[in-house]
Image (cartoon, helix red, strand yellow):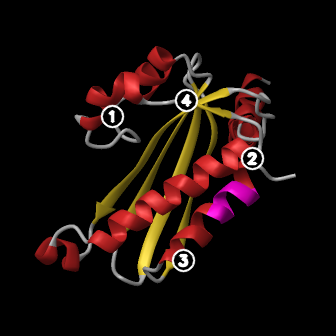
Amino acid sequence: MRHILVALILTMWPALACAALDKPLEPGAKVAFLGMTFIDLSTEGTYNGVRADETARLELMESAARDRFVQEGFVMLSTAPVAAELASTVNPADCNGCELHMGERLGADYVLVGEVRKISNLILSVELVLRDVNSGQILRGIAVDIRSNTDDSWLRGIRYILKNHFFKS
C-alpha cells in the first residue's frame, strides 16, 4: 500500500508543481524588474563582441515587459537603491538568489528577471521568470525560442510570454 501511495505522489508531482505556476498574481503588487541579461553563445559574438542593435533590442524588450506589467495594474519599483549591486551582478537571473535579496531591499512583492540567449543570428531563446520575494517560489517562468534577430522577433517573443503565460485569461 505504501509503495502505491509513493508511486501516486511521484506520478502527480509534475502536475502539482505546474499548478503553482497558475496561481493568480496579487493585483497591485510591487514588482522589482532587475532587467534582461543578454548571453551571446554565437560564433559571431565570440569574434565581434557586443552589437549596438542587440543592446537596443534588450532595452526595447525590457520596456515592453514593464509597460505590460503596468497595464495589468502592477507597481514597477525603481531599482536605484540597489543600482550598485545590480551593476556588479553579471546575471540577476542566475545569481544564487541575489535577485530575491535585492527585491526584498526594494520592498517588492515579486521580482522579475529574464535572459535572451543568442545561439546564432537565426536562433534565440527568451526566458522570463517571476518569483515571490518572501517565499522564493517561482510564480511564472517560461522560455520561448524565436527565429530571426530583429526588433520585431524579439518583441514578438516577450509579448508571447506575457500574453500566453504571465497574463493569460
Kind of residue at disc 3: Ser
Q: Which of marks 3 and 4 is nearer the N terminus?
A: 4
**Element class at badge 2:** helix
Q: Where is residue 104 shown, x and y percent of the image?
A: 49, 17
Residue drawn at point x = 34 percent, y = 58 percent = 38
Q: How far apart are marks 1 and 4 (CA)?
A: 20 Å
**Residue density around tag 3, few if under 14, some if 14–19, many if 20 or more, within 10 Å:** some
Which numbered tag is attached to residue 71? Answer: 2
Residue 74, located in which quarter of the rendered image?
Answer: top right
Q: How far apart are marks 1 and 2 (CA)?
A: 29 Å
Residue range in magenta is: 159-164
Query: Which residue is under mark 4?
Result: 77
Q: Does the magenta stretch include residue 161?
A: yes
Query: Which residue is under mark 1?
Result: 95
**Element class at badge 1:** loop
Disc nearest the viewer among 1 and 2: 2
Compared with residue 151, is residue 22 higher up or lower down, i.e. above or below? above
Q: Where is residue 119 shown, x and y percent of the image?
A: 34, 73
Q: Earlier in the sequence, mark 2 or mark 4?
A: 2
Kind of residue at disc 4: Leu
Q: How far apart are marks 1 and 3 (CA)?
A: 27 Å
Disc nearest the viewer among 3 and 4: 4
Q: Where is residue 67 shown, x and y percent of the image?
A: 64, 50
Query: Which residue is under mark 3?
Result: 153
Residue 142: in sight, yes or no? no
Residue drawn at point x = 26 percent, y = 74 percent = 42
**Residue density around tag 2, few if under 14, some if 14–19, many if 20 or more, within 10 Å:** few
Kind of residue at disc 1: Cys
**Residue density around tag 1, few if under 14, some if 14–19, many if 20 or more, within 10 Å:** few
Kind of residue at disc 2: Gln
Residue 92, located in which quarter of the rendered image?
Answer: top left
Residue drawn at point x = 76 percent, y = 33 percent = 25
